Amino acid sequence: MSDPKEKKQCITPFMKQCFVTAGVSLNMAGSGLVVGFTTGLLQQLKAPDSIIQIDEVSGSWIAAIIGISLLIGNFLAPPLMSKFGRKIANLITIVPLIVGWAAIYFAKSVTVLIMARLLQGLCMGMCTSIGSLLIGEYSSPKYRGAFLMTISVSIATAVLFVHSLGSYLSWQVTSLICGVISIIDLFIVIYSPESPSWLADKGRYEACKKTFRWLRGDTEEEELREIINASIALKEEQAKEVQPTSLTNKIASEIDYIKSTVVKKEFLKPIIIMIHIYILGQWNGVNMLVAYPIDMFNRMVGTNTNMPLLVMTLDIHRIVANTTALYVIQKVKRRTILGVTVIMNILAVITCAGYMYAKQTGLLPPDEYILGVALVHAHMFSVATGALPLCFIIAGEIFPLEYRSLAGGISVLFYSLNMFVTMKSVPLMFTTIDLFGTYIVFAIFMTYSFLVVWFLLPETKDRTLQDIEDEFRGRPLSPKELKSVQSIASIRAYTPDRRCSGTSVI
């Protein structure tokens, strides 16, 4: 008989990190299911025999309404993460998603569909804030890029899955299957541990050590020591401060804290970068390709084609491109990938615009479609290997520890706004400026955002979160600044060897 200890050792830290990452990625895949679900749903609701009748306006609201509740979810996530922990916050995001799928399954009116989508948008807003952050805290630096990349791959796979279901099954059955997937994810998250960083921040050092070693093994003790020492030093500094007693003083203290925080480079620059990264991620045409692929293909190549086949091959291409990026992201610097793929993206949408112009002016025959399909796939490749996956990777790397929840929530607020505006405006742009003008709008937004990000974003590949934070600040902390700066990660940078001088409790 085999030794139980040997069996235990077979479950490596890498496998454990894969397990906890699966819970996060599957939750993020729920976002892909929610967004991609609209393709089959809207096409079936437009049928004359549909039990729920819609027009263009109500259809666009069903598709885009998730962007509104995304905002609420963004604001709810940071306090939930801070007070109850990353794991509990992750669990809370799954419940509205399950309820939303159940409501859609039983829906008999547009109102119920919109309310269900609002609920699902709430989940998307929260899990978008939590996902990248939690994977960043769970995973080892050498695996972090690949694990963060699984977010994009899982979303792409979810879109293919729900598009395939929507092509052959009713929207009610599709929603039921999606709900079952969310229930499976619920159980994975239940059996996942809490974030070691959050446990240390709450002073639960023994639990922190146990969880960290369960996730990482015993080969990363230096990072564990730094996390705990930094937390101790932070609490010692906080204990020396005089706490305000009256409500007025507390409010004044909070205002002063916010004022001092928003001018810090290590807080402000990552937010500016992520705002523009999310513009790149939403205005690159991905929402058109995911939520309105049939309308896009009808204008691009005509209606005399096998539409389900075109949509599913496009989704498969996205998964292949995401998987390719999963490998490339481990080998190539972040800035290099960003530069190459975003420039490809801009050139792709400009070329698509030129193709549409050529068809409209008679330079190309109206029944030409092979070149059009090839251009759409080139567009998808540039999206799936560049700005879209890099959104989640960079979001998990550039925020300082103390402000990570707040900064992440603020930046994802702009993600929500951009998502809502793009999904609501794409049908309007189709009818007013046509597909040609829509591509031109995408090119303008991407060019502006790319220039901002390129000049502000430092290289983050294979660097610790502390190194990245120090670069945003411009230098490690000096002793005089120690009392005014309350970032755990910042305190770690105090001593010359970039560790905190607090007493080790290991």
Image (cartoon, rainbow, N blue to C red):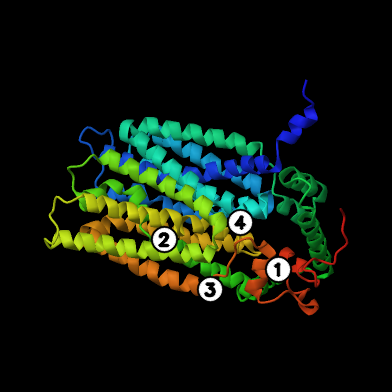
> What amino acid does circle 3 point to?
Leu
N-term mark: 1 or 4: 4
* Residue positioned 58% across, 54% down in the render: 145
Marks 2 and 1 sit apart, C-alpha to C-alpha, by 35 Å
Q: Which label number is shown at residue 418?
A: 2
Which comes sooner in the sequence, label 2 or label 4?
4
Q: Is residue 282 above or below residue 179?
A: below
Give percent across and percent down for residue 385.
45, 55
Residue 410's label in the rendered image is: none
Please state which of the two labelled residues, at mark 1 or mark 3, is closer to the viewer.
3
The residue under label 2 is which amino acid type? Answer: Asn
The residue at the point 22 percent across, 32 percent down is 49
Instruction: Identify the residue position indicated by label 1 in the image.
Output: 250
Please tell me which of labels 1 and 3 falls first in the chain. Answer: 1
Element under disc 2 = helix
Q: Position of residue 415 (x, y in %)?
A: 47, 59
Query: Which residue lies under the disc numbered 3?
Result: 456
- The answer to which of marks 2 and 1 sits earlier in the sequence is 1
Amino acid carrying mark 4 in the image = Pro
Q: Nearer the viewer, residue 275 or 465?
A: 465
> Which type of secondary structure does the marked residue at label 3 adopt?
helix
Q: Are marks 4 and 3 in contact (CB under 8 Å)?
A: no
Secondary structure type for disc 1: helix
Q: For the residues marked 4 and 3, what is the alpha-carbon distance in whole angstroms? A: 25 Å
Residue that numbered label 4 is attached to = 78
Marks 3 and 2 sit apart, C-alpha to C-alpha, by: 21 Å
Q: Nearer the viewer, mark 4 or mark 3?
A: 3
Query: What separation in Å lies between label 2 and label 4 (alpha carbons)?
Result: 20 Å
Structural crowding at the residue carrying mark 1, measured as other residues with C-alpha within 10 Å and reported as few (<14), some (14–19) or many (≥20): few
